[in-house]
Image (cartoon, rainbow, N blue to C red):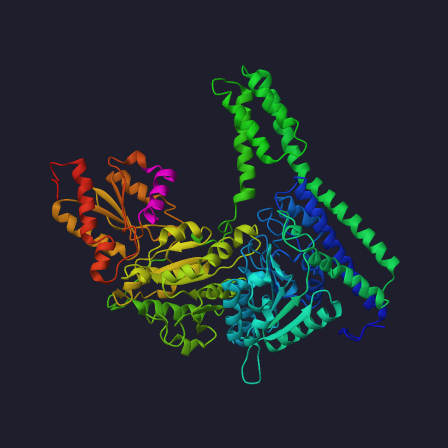
């Protein structure tokens, strides 16, 4: 008979038995992968391993209720779940362990992430969307603990949007009436992170179909729960989030991780609530074990008592599952023994197949290199030095690509004074090999498809003869109105973005026109605002996440850097999240609202376009360009520009500001001044004043920091003026240092310079408060004038006598 404690559809006993034994088989395969994977690391075939042993049963229960269209946002213990939904094979497990760079063999990251970081493919080969409702989906994992939580919120919120917003009802490739559930997993220790609590709070407020599973084995690495969680019980302290008759909230379920029928019932209950009613659920899975410790870097015997180790052996979930199967006469001991033997054989074969697939490719490359080096060796005067290099490479039983390049590149050192066809062949081989192999590790940081942002052609604003000057904020407002009218999947949200239309009224009246789903307020929680955006963008919506001021980006930079910026890269272009982050900064007074930490963002957010429009017309054009493409971007509007007057373009919806393109604001012949954002206005004023002393400066607006000046227009300017000054309000060595690096190291500007290229930035501290604080903290018009004059004085002191 089927146990009465487990909810089961009306099926035959044979079908029921097959379900149970399939789960048991998957649990065994997963565990054996973990055990054998650890050995592969310890024998040196892999650098590191972190596995899902001990967590098998709850993942099997979760897989039972995971439907097509659903999304997972989890962490690196979920290998059993991925196997159970048929998205992970034994061979792929080991391919990930070996960092195989073939996306067909290692479909999660093409070897770019360590094993245990799972992803399904959301994109076709041309970068267009697959039908996400016809497949089971896993958003790409990241290692930072709790970093998967904000994205989980967005994945769940997408279902709420699709269920309640009529304008996207036809987007059936992404949702079927919002019936999809987002399933999150996290270790109990990681619930100590702020990202977890911010996500839980936001999920309760938004009431989204989200199920959070907390795998609780009492430890976080080697640190016991008593050092992690108040009362040593996460569900106990989450009780305040539980829904009641008067208040929405969470359903909270506590279940033991070794109790198979209770786990199946728990996940069925969670699915019903989340899928049908959009009630978020937390499942606290207690009494789990971690039989191999945290990872391959150490053993759990170092920090667990013998009593705890004995308990873990007794309550190992697979052992308890086996006992349950036998007790309820689902299968005999002999039948289970046969399954166990078969699982071990399958894992061993899968390991061998994966290793052979990985190493055979490199061995073929090794042979080609050795054959070429033998040819070089036989002709070289430095044969005695080359022979050891060749022999070392040839003797490698398990070569890696570094071995090949070390041998071939070092050999070239001994050929510098020789001329031979063999040397030319080796030079060509090394260059070709690097060109072939480097992209396996480097490509797809940005889009390489036709839809990439830099392909969107510029459309300049047009003006009628009677065009009026208006507050610049109205250009943004009217452009957003056009966006929301023509792009039904677009929406915007953030602090003060909804009811009052943002702090500078760039969204004035739009919530009333387009509704609270598409133009909405969010709580003061920047990390989950970004998470909402990432998750919704991964499900086909076009979100604009508003971070009120650039300074507040620091609250969410971890998600931007570790998740959004790396998503396309770490999935080998199999997932994307074309999220636009809208914010405002520059020239505000005071330490905490100075808004110019551009240098840090440039380096932390590689993979995201960083755009710095000087006015609102340019900003509007950037939003239009980005929505024609499929890449994430940060747009920094000028905080002091909303009330300045600009002409209202007659072709507002058509404007496209090009990405990676500078603009020459003023032509000149004596020196090139380069800046961006609000500082550019000071540069323009200084350029006018410099004319009074006979200095004709060319002024260039960078516009786009990532990417930067793809046409090398600044170099063309310096070829004419032979002098360069870069000005901004970041700290010294920040964005100005980055710009100088691009110009010198990549664009070879030095060949045109008659004077030392210089930078002018803010003081090394945050700006002091007040107008005088701003004046003495950041470059002023006088600073720009004098710095430019000093450069001219150095080159021609007779014409430009010392100023002070």
Q: Is the magenta stretch mostly helix, strand or loop?
A: helix
| Left or right relative to 458: residue 189 | right
Q: Nearer the viewer, residue 417 or 770?
A: 770
- In the image, the segment drawn in magenta is 732-749
In reply to whether residue 686 is colored magenta, the answer given is no
The location of residue 105, given as percent across then percent down, is 66, 47
Q: Quadrant of the N terminus?
A: bottom right
**Quadrant of the image occupied by residue 713:** top left
Q: Which residue is drawn at 82% across and 72% down?
A: 2
User: Considering only vertical position in the picture, is 49 above or below 84?
Assistant: above
Residue 172 visible in the current orientation: no
Check the image and report above or below for 33 versus 396: below
**Position of 762 relative to 184 (above/below):** above
- Foreground of the two, 220 or 761: 220
Left or right position of 70 against 340: left
Q: Which residue is more in the foreground, 11 or 146?
A: 146
Q: In this view, does 690 lie to the left or right of 29?
A: left
**Image location (x, y in percent) of residue 211:** 61, 69
In the figure, residue 657 lies in which quadrant?
bottom left
Q: In this view, does 530 lie to the left or right of 88?
A: left
Extreme-top residue of the structure: 381
Q: Position of residue 309 (x, y in %)?
A: 70, 56
- Magenta run includes residue 743: yes
Q: Residue at x 34, y 71 (%)?
A: 503
Residue 746 visible in the displayed image:
yes
């Amino acid at each position: 008979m089927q146990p009465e404690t487990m909810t089961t559809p009306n099926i035959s006993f044979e079908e029921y038995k097959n379900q149970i034994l399939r789960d048991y088989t998957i649990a065994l395969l997963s565990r054996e992968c973990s055990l054998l994977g650890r050995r592969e690391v310890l024998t040196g075939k892999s650098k590191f391993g972190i596995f899902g042993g001990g967590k098998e049963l709850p993942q099997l229960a979760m897989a039972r209720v995971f439907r097509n269209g659903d999304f997972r946002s989890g962490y690196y213990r979920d290998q059993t779940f991925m196997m159970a939904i048929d998205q992970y094979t034994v061979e792929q497990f080991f391919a990930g362990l070996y960092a195989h760079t073939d996306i067909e063999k290692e479909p999660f990251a093409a070897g770019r992430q360590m094993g245990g970081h799972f992803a399904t493919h959301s994109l076709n080969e041309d970068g267009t969307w697959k039908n996400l409702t016809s497949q089971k989906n896993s958003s790409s994992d990241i290692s930072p603990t709790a970093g998967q939580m904000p994205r989980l919120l967005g994945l769940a919120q997408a279902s709420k949007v699709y269920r309640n917003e009529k304008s996207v009802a036809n987007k059936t490739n992404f949702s079927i009436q919002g019936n999809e559930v987002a399933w999150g997993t996290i270790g109990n220790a990681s619930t100590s992170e702020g990202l977890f609590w911010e996500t839980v709070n936001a999920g309760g407020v938004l009431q989204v179909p989200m199920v959070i599973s907390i795998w609780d084995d009492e430890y976080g690495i080697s640190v016991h729960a008593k050092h992690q969680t108040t009362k040593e019980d996460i569900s106990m302290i989450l009780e305040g989030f539980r829904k009641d008759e008067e208040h929405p909230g969470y359903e909270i379920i506590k279940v033991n991780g070794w109790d198979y029928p209770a786990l199946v019932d728990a996940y069925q209950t969670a699915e019903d609530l989340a899928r049908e009613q959009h009630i978020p659920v937390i499942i606290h899975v207690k009494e789990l074990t971690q039989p191999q410790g945290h990872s391959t870097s150490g053993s759990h015997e170092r920090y667990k008592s013998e009593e705890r180790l004995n308990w873990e052996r007794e309550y190992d979930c697979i052992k308890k599952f086996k006992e349950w199967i036998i007790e309820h006469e689902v299968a005999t001991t002999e039948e289970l023994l046969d399954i166990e033997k078969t699982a071990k054989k399958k894992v061993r074969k899968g390991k061998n197949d994966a290793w052979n697939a990985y190493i055979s490719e490199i061995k073929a490359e090794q042979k080609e290199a050795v054959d070429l080096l033998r040819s070089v060796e036989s002709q070289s005067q430095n044969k005695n030095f080359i022979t050891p290099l060749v022999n070392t490479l040839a003797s490698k039983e398990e070569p890696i690509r570094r071995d090949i390049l070390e041998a071939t590149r070092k050999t070239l050192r001994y050929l510098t004074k020789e001329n031979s066809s063999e040397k030319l062949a080796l030079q060509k081989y090394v260059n070709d090999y690097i060109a072939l192999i480097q992209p396996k590790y480097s490509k797809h940081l940005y889009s390489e498809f036709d839809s990439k942002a830099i392909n969107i052609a510029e459309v300049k604003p047009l003006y009628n003869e009677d065009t009026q000057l208006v507050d610049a904020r109205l250009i943004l407002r009217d452009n957003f109105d056009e966006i929301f009218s023509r792009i039904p999947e677009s929406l915007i949200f953030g602090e003060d973005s909804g009811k009052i239309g943002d702090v500078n009224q760039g969204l004035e009246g739009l919530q009333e026109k387009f509704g609270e789903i598409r133009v909405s307020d969010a709580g003061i929680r920047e990390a989950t605002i970004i998470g909402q955006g990432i998750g919704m963008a991964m499900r086909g919506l076009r979100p604009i996440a508003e971070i009120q001021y650039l300074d507040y980006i620091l609250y969410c930079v971890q998600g931007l850097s570790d998740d959004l910026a790396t998503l396309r890269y770490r999935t080998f272009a199999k997932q994307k999240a074309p999220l636009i982050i809208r914010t405002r900064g520059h020239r505000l007074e005071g330490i905490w609202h100075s808004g110019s930490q551009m240098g840090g963002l440039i380096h932390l957010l590689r993979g995201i376009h960083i755009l710095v429009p000087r006015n609102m017309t340019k900003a509007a054009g950037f939003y239009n360009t980005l929505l024609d493409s499929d890449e994430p971007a940060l747009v920094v509007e000028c905080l002091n520009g909303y009330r300045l007057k600009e002409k209202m373009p007659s072709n507002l919806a058509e404007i496209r500001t090009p990405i990676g393109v500078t603009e020459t604001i003023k032509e000149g012949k004596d020196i090139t001044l380069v800046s961006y954002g609000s500082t550019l206005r000071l540069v323009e004023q200084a350029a006018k004043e410099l004319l009074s002393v006979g200095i004709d400066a060319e002024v260039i607006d960078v516009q786009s920091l990532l990417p930067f000046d793809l046409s090398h227009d600044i170099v063309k300017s310096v070829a004419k003026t032979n002098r360069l000054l870069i000005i901004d309000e970041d700290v010294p060595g920040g964005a100005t240092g980055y710009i100088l690096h691009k110009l010198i190291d990549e664009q070879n500007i030095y060949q045109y310079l008659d004077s030392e290229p210089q930078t002018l930035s803010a003081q090394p501290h945050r700006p002091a408060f007040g107008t005088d604080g701003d004046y003495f903290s950041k470059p002023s018009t006088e600073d720009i004038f004098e710095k430019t004059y000093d450069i001219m004085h150095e080159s021609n002191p007779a014409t430009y006598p010392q100023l002070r």
